[in-house]
Amino acid sequence: MSAPLTSLDRPNSYIGRSVPRPNAKRLLAGRGRYVSDLKLPRMLHAGFLRSPHAHAKIVSIDTEQARALDGVHLVATGTDLARICTPWTGTLDHFKGMTSAPQLPLPVDRVVWAGQAVVAVVAESRAIAEDALELIEIAYEDLPVVVDIDSAREAGGPVINPGSANNTCFRSQLDNGTVDAAFAHATHVVEEEFTFGRHTAVTLEPRAIVADYDPAAGMLTVHHATQTPYQFQDLYSRHYGIPEARVRVIATDIGGSFGMKLHVYHEDMAVVGLSILLGRPVKYVADRIESFVSDIHARDHRVRARMALDAKGEILAMDVLDLTAVGAFSTYPRTSVVEGNQVIRLMGAPYRFKNYRASLEVIFQNKVQTSQYRAVGHPIACAVTERLVDMAASKLGLDPFAIRAQNVIADDAYPQTSATGYRFEALSHQACLKRLHEIMDYDGLRAEQADLRQRGVYRGIGIATFVEITNPSPAFYGVGGARISSQDGAILSLTPSGEVRCMISVTEQGQGTEAIISQIVADQLGLAPEHVKVITGDTEVTPHGGATWACRGAGIGGETALQATRGLKRNILEIAALILQEQPSALDIVDGEVVDAGTRKPRLPIAEIARIAYFRSDTLPPGTQAQLTVSHHFAPQGYPFAFTNGIQGCSLEVDVETGFIRVLKHFIVEDCGRVINPMLVDEQLRGGIVQGLGAALFEECRYSETGQLMNGSLADYLVPMPMEMPDIVIAHVETPTADTELGAKGVGEAGTAAASACVLNAVNDALAPFGATINSIPITPAKVLKALKRF
Amino acid sequence: MSGFDGTLLDESDATVRVRFVVNGRKVACEVAPRETLVDCLRNALELTGTHAGCEMGACGACLVQLDGRAVHSCLMFAVQADGATIDTIEGLTESGVIADLQAEFHRRNALQCGFCTPGMLVNAHELLSQVAQPSREEIRDALSGNYCRCTGYEAIVDAIDAVAKARSEGGGAT
Ligand code: FES
Ligand code: FES
């Protein structure tokens, strides 16, 4: 990487600067345009009748009264939609042997979780649609319900998908090195079984979609609150048989997604079909209760793991079994096995040991599907690894910092391949550990902890190192046959008045995509960012690309913008050189002016070049064709993923009388490569950590024995609120990736990846004087009291 | 035209006329008795800056000012608000009363998706009109009914804190 990119004293150097997001002003004024706000002429509203049973046969559906209600335009069942929509299956080829039953927008003969949509009503208002739902009668015949992992795995137990031998969705194994020998020769072995509850995204804006099919034009337009408009363009086209060029998906402002809104939902597919059947726009916005029972959930793992160490505390091996239950189907098109796959591959990632064995078993059950949600698999792999490391440290009498310092891959030892087979380009665990020790004032915290213990106050300190997967290549989905792009595209124009318009395939969910893209374009071209207009999220306008997920917006989208801008700059300077009778290499652009490269003496505004090229091309030398629009695609090459790393620390207090935990302060040292906008990176970290703290302490989708979600409302499902959340101290180490010019990697998952591990270690640290331990997340007061044998 | 069949109308079609002063202007609308204030504001009056996140008083996305106080518009029927003076994010923006809060939220990036933001601003405005110099603890406490999934809250607390200090120093926050 050349130095100028980081030097902030160069003119127009915006990469690396904390600039506020220009598009945030609209949102602050209440002028956001969310899909839930959208109203189109002749628009109708859909509502869904949902199954009260977790597993049942649909015997009959009587919709007569509902159809007769005034204001009702359509009542549609599974059979009605199956006539126009082809089924989908949530499997990918590179997950060998995985199975999942075909899915339709609405079920035809069987429901497989409580809350599954069964019948759709389209009416003039949502209220009328809901009135009509009450008039529908469905006769069900109960089938045996499979709720927990153990009963789902029982041989000869009830099977969810008829025709399959058991409830197994997928199995996978890894076996590297000599694990048995390592355990046989180990001085110390630590072992534990961990459970991770289900939780869910709880975006503040629920899922929202408006489908608008125009039969005259044969054109489908879908306003879809999603991260991935291109993926949905492809899916709507293929499943409804509409040519791709006649499907337009527009993803405008979105009230949070975090991975949840990039999956196919049955209701969303149904709404598209309903609009096709009616030839009118149809809107559906999930209410909060519907969100809880139909949005994907995440986690739900039970992990048994052991770690072998030698007498000095060197980690020798890990052996892991991950069982995870994913609902009745695997989610489409990204599947429900990626999380488990990442759990077994991220285990032990920061450390040097080479012997590793893991089994993954992914199981079906009668609950709503799980799938990718922020930090997929990371919190589980991190919590298991880091807790075992702490258990080993206490067995060996080592400090948590010391055992990690001893075992992390050294900063100067890269490139490296992990015991699980991931290839790391360059990570900085040692630097991060050192920095965390400083910013936490670790010794001070320990002294205070000892002091307070004398007075019956139980504080805990926990740390957790982590590795995060970012910038995924086609190895992630493409190789499995999914039409999910790992490249991005940008179209960049110099407008007639000398401004720049950038249409790019990465999308905005509030993390600041548009801001960083404008910074990169402005920086690379040489003008102020306010003269760069970034346009995202419309398949009719922006070029095809992967969009924003799995931490790829800055790394891949940013590089796309950088390369496109360099292309546009070359073209501008070529025309400038002709006009000024100079060599292009003798010229540069600063603040929107072409200048002499050496002296920076202004020669000609780029607006003047645009004016001449667009309106007075007759004055250019014959044969000149000015190319002031550039299109450019970029697909990551080199390493299949750009891994990032970091370490978190947490200080908390456990009330041993009530079991309540108060997080006092949280710390993170993070290395996401080149930082484009430090403020936005810090806000990603803070938001991610708080999501991780929610998972660690509060959030769990609780089910009854009959498969009913017991706490599906915002009053019953606990989310982190301002009162319970700590201030968060942040520091950075920067190890850019050499795979791109920009050098940026992702940062969206880092906060969530290690927060629960950190809290788990801190709570166990606090409980150490009692000999009590916790191995289950979320760490509720009841679990704390149980561990203390007070409940 | 004759032939309109009166039996097609039933009670659920009955609407009630309500009048409010919304963002400084008198408005009247016909609402169904079961319609909540948030739905009336968003649908009939097209004031979509007020959001609905839970419709049960738990998330704060729907907060508006009603007769000068922050109120959950999801917990109130539109008919109950008949005769009230209501200010939504749109009106508070236009009048400039929260301009300093908005600028500080922007400067510190105290929002990501922005869905919680109108409710946060209404609540922050309420807090600062009650308590001139709240502590960070008091700010967090006041926001304890405002859910934000994106930010982690710290920047929001920082922004309100900075505005409180700037206001009490007599200048505007910058
Ligand atoms: S929508 Fe009113 S508090 Fe959530
Ligand atoms: S900014 Fe997204 S919910 Fe607060």
Image (cartoon, grey):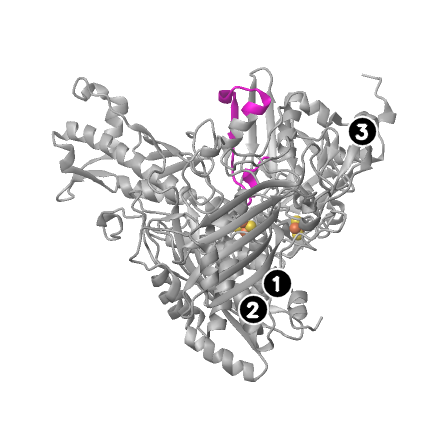
In the picture provided, is A574 more to the left or to the right than A85?
A: left
Q: Secondary structure at mark 3?
A: helix
Q: Mark 3 CB in 8 Å range of ligand 1?
A: no
Query: Residue A611: where, in percent of width, then height?
Result: 26, 27
- The quadrant of the picture occupied by the C terminus of chain B is bottom left
Asked which quadrant contains residue A652, the reply is: bottom right
Q: Which mark is in front, 2 or 3?
A: 2
Q: Amino acid at mark 3?
A: Ala
Q: Verify whether residue A621 appears in magenta.
A: no
Q: Which mark is in front, 1 or 3?
A: 1
Q: Chain of mark 3?
A: A
**Residue A163 visible in the snapshot:** yes
The disc, 2 or 1, on the residue closer to the chain's N-terminal end is 2
Whether marks 2 and 3 lie on the same chain: yes
Q: Chain of mark 2?
A: A
Which region is colored magenta? A237-264
Q: Which residue is mark 3?
A: A66
Q: Chain of mark 1?
A: A
Q: Mark 2 CB in 8 Å range of ligand 2?
A: no
Q: Which residue is mark 1?
A: A779
Q: Which residue is mark 2?
A: A763
Asked which quadrant contains residue A616, the reply is: top left
Q: Secondary structure at mark 2?
A: helix
In the picture provided, is A408 more to the left or to the right than A305?
A: left
Q: CA distance from mark 2 to mark 1?
A: 9 Å
Q: How many numbered marks, from 0 up?
A: 3
Query: Residue A114: where, in percent of width, then height?
Result: 73, 42
Query: Residue B57: where, in percent of width, then height?
Result: 69, 53
Residue pushed farthest bottom?
A454
